[in-house]
Image (cartoon, rainbow, N blue to C red):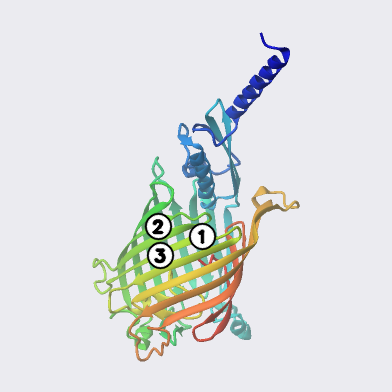
Amino acid sequence: MFSPKVHSLLAFFLLFVGIQHVSAQYRLTKKDTTFVIDNIYITGNKKTKKYIILREIELKKGDTVYLHQLLRRIKKSRENLMNRSLFNSVEITPQRHNFNKVDLYVEVTERWYIWPIPIITYADRNFNVWWETKNFSRLNYGINLTVFNFRGRMETLNVLLQGGYDKSLQFSLEIPYINKKQKWGVLISAGATLNHETDYKLRENKLVSYHTEKAYSKKWYFGALSATFRPKYYYLNTLTLGFDHREYADTLLKLNPEFAYSQDKFSYLSLEYNFKYDFRDYIPYPLKGFYAEADIKQDGLGLLSKEVNMLSFYLIFDQYLQLHKRWYFAYSLAAEMVPAKYQPYFLQKGLGYKPMKIRGYQLYLVGGNWIGQIRSNLKFAIIPKKTALIPFIKTEKFNRFFYGLYANLFFDAAYVASTTPKNDRSFLNNKLLYGVGMGIDFVTYYDVVIRAECVLNRSNQLHFFLSFVAPI
């Protein structure tokens, strides 16, 4: 009926269609409709519990998703895992089988989790002052031990022991999940610090300290219990009940009557609620995404000291944008408010106190009741993030790393509204403050960020600063 040539053409066509059909069963193509997550396989987690990793993956066994959803959730799942600071690298590879089923292969490289950092500091203003006397009795020494991923459950244990001139003992344990659904967590912290030197006022927007050799000018005992609630991946709610007991040398109140309340010894409770919405691609040094935070705190609940009574709250919004292949822009808007007219010095808020800060004024503190600030950054990736191996290091916890180098142009501004005391000689309150400059950032594994910046502020002061956190 048909010629041999037609038969050959028909056979070739059917073979071609068959090959394409079989191939399509095992590749992810844009023509596909939905996929079913069949299995999730995890390798490399020698210490980390499997359920901790699965908690951060936005795909579960049995989920049905479209191709674009699959690719987006794989990307976000990798970012979630990297943002937990548990791994040096994370790879998630999908493999298709049985027409529309997909297996996920998750490969992680765990970090080194135990970091005992020795403490060797001096009580003097700087090393050169101490070197003049070489008085070893004025040295502080001890250890700051942090164990990340404690028990393989993403818990963080910290113990600080410091002896010598000033003494400190601190303990904290963060347990992110205490229930089966991995939504609720707790944070416990407590400690005591004994200091010979205590700052008691600002003069010309810089700290003025009181020092005594024979006794401690400040004794601070504290404790806190926090409950955390993280329903999904990006929201975190924290409610904290805190306890503070403070004892100050009576000389501090004589030097500054507004240092504290009427007594030099007092105890009080505090209650704080914090909300975070974190959608950044890499928290230690974000390039894309956004971040929002709101915090409200009441110092003094009227149960212990009736004098302590101060309400404060702040808002932060950061956004990170990729303008072009290597060009990025970021900005941050923040405001802090303290409605109370009277702020004792030891509870003072303002610019330079966490979380309010702008570049160009790192050497100053500006106390106030109402603070607004904006920070902005234009960034160029000189060396976009690259992965490399160090062949002579055998352990995978250190031999595989990434690095990146970025150049920055920035502009920051802030305004602090406050009533300036006459004897303060502060000159930065109730003025528009700004800093403009350029810098270079180096980013690598273990959340390390090293920034070198040159900045000119409103007072035409040119400064060079080194920093170790992301600018925004």
Disc 3 to disc 1: CB gap under 8 Å = no
Q: Is residue 215 above or below residue 239?
A: below
Residue at mark 2? 276
Counting residues from the start of the chain, the first of labels 3 and 2 encountered is: 2
Residue at mark 3? 316
Pick the front one: 81 or 238? 81
Disc 3 to disc 2: CB gap under 8 Å = no
Q: Residue at x 55, y 25 (%)?
A: 98
The answer for how far apart the CA atoms under marks 3 and 2 are is 9 Å
Pick the front one: 224 or 293? 293
The answer for how far apart the CA atoms under marks 3 and 1 are is 17 Å
The answer for how far apart the CA atoms under marks 2 and 1 are is 20 Å
Number of residues whose C-alpha sits closer than 10 Å to that of mark 2, classed few (under 14), some (14–19) or many (20 or more): some
Question: Where does residue 162 sit, x and y in percent of width and height?
Answer: 52, 68
Amino acid type of the residue that numbered disc 1 sits on in the rendered structure: Leu
Residue at mark 1? 321
